[in-house]
Each structure stands twice: as C-alpha cells, then as structure tokens.
Image: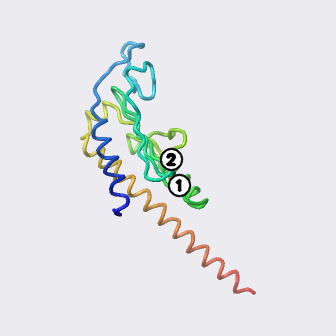
C-alpha cells in the first residue's frame, strides 16, 4: 500500500468500525419485516449522519449508517476517459455478480462507482473485522486492477499503432 493511500484507508477503516455498531430493528410500519433503514428511509430518527471521506475530488467514500444497516459507497478515481471506461466496465462486471459478494449492491449510489450494503443479519453471520478488511482490501485492489488494465490497453494500442505504421 502506498504512503499516500494509507491515511485515507485508515480513516475509512476507523469510520467503518465505528459505524458497524448496528442492531436488529424491525420495521415500524410493516409488521414482521426487517428492512434496512438506510435504504428504506422510513423515519429520520433512525438514520445517523452520513460521513464522506475524500482522498481527492474524484476518489471518495461515503458511509451512511443507520440503526440496522450501513451503506458504503466508493468513488474510484478516474483521471481520464480510459480510466472512466475501464472503471465503468469493471464495476459493472462485479455488480452483475453481486450474489457472490453478498454485501455488494447491484446498483451504486448516485455519483459513486460501487456500493455495499451491510445489514444486521450480515453481522450475525460474518465477523465485523473481516467485513471491514474486505472493503479496505477491495478499495486497494480495485485501483491496482484498473491501473493494470490501463497499462495493458496502452501497451496494446502502442503495438497496434506500430504495426499500422509499418505499412507506410
């Protein structure tokens, strides 16, 4: 992990650990239902203040806690058009397989690349510190993957251009 990324991820980690103190809270409007309040937004007193952690203007993390769920939205850095396209394709690929990730949402929050939804039932089945580690590891690796794909695309474009120019 680079030295510039460490403080950002440490801040995200400590905020996630603090916001994952959630409990079972059944719906106040529908009997025998337990809906995530951060998604349902049934009453404002059940929602806590959202926290936005920014590394740059384009790379940020939004943590929205509530009494029984936490939504974590991540905006992946996109410096140019190639990174925008690669990020969109990569996150779309991941979101189509969201069942395997369990906590990943199929559709991200507006203006963010990808979102996770952690409910009380997830914390009953999984360890909290492992969920936090997964999200932090995901944030580290997605940047590496997109950078690697960008390098591969540029190398391939360089080879194609050189082969094309050999004809002249």
Figure quadrant of the N terminus: bottom left
Nearest to the observer: residue 135 or residue 160:
135
**Residue 14: percent from left, percent from top:** 29, 44
For disc 2, the marked residue is 113
Nearest to the observer: residue 51 or residue 151:
51
**Residue 40: percent from left, percent from top:** 45, 24
The residue positioned 40% from the left and 38% from the top of the image is 51
On residue 87, the disc is: 1
The residue positioned 26% from the left and 39% from the top of the image is 126
**Residue 31: percent from left, percent from top:** 38, 12
Looking at the picture, does residue 28 appear above or below residue 123?
A: above
Q: Secondary structure at mark 2?
A: loop
Residue 42 quadrant: top left
Q: Secondary structure at mark 1?
A: helix
53 on left or right of 111: left
Looking at the picture, does residue 1 appear above or below residue 109?
A: below
Looking at the picture, does residue 167 appear above or below residue 128?
A: below
54 on left or right of 9: right
Looking at the picture, does residue 64 appear above or below residue 153?
A: above
> Total marks drawn?
2
Of the two numbered discs 2 and 1 on the same chain, state the one appearing first in sequence: 1
As measured in the structure, the alpha-carbon distance from the residue carrying label 2 to the one carrying label 1 is 8 Å
- In this view, the residue farthest toward the right is 168
65 on left or right of 166: left
Circle 2 packing at 10 Å, graded few (<14), some (14-19), many (20+), is many
The residue positioned 36% from the left and 36% from the top of the image is 118
141 on left or right of 161: left
Figure quadrant of the C terminus: bottom right
Contact between labelled residues 1 and 2, with CB atoms less than 8 Å apart: yes
The image's colouring method is: rainbow
Circle 1 packing at 10 Å, graded few (<14), some (14-19), many (20+), is many
On residue 39, the disc is: none
């Amino acid at each position: 992990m680079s030295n510039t990324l460490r403080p950002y991820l440490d801040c995200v980690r400590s905020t996630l650990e603090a916001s994952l103190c959630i409990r079972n809270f059944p719906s106040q409007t529908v009997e025998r239902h337990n809906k995530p309040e951060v998604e349902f937004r049934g009453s404002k007193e059940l929602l806590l203040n959202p926290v936005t952690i920014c590394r740059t203007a384009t790379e940020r993390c939004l943590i929205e806690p509530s009494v029984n769920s936490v939504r974590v939205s991540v905006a992946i850095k996109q410096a140019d058009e190639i990174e925008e396209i690669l990020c969109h394709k990569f996150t779309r690929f991941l979101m189509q397989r969201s069942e395997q990730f369990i906590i990943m949402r199929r559709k991200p929050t507006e203006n963010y690349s990808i979102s996770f939804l952690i409910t009380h039932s997830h914390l009953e089945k999984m360890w909290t510190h492992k969920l936090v580690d997964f999200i932090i590891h995901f944030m580290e690796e997605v940047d590496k993957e997109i950078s690697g794909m960008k390098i591969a695309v540029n190398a391939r474009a360089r080879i194609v251009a050189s082969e094309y120019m050999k004809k002249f």
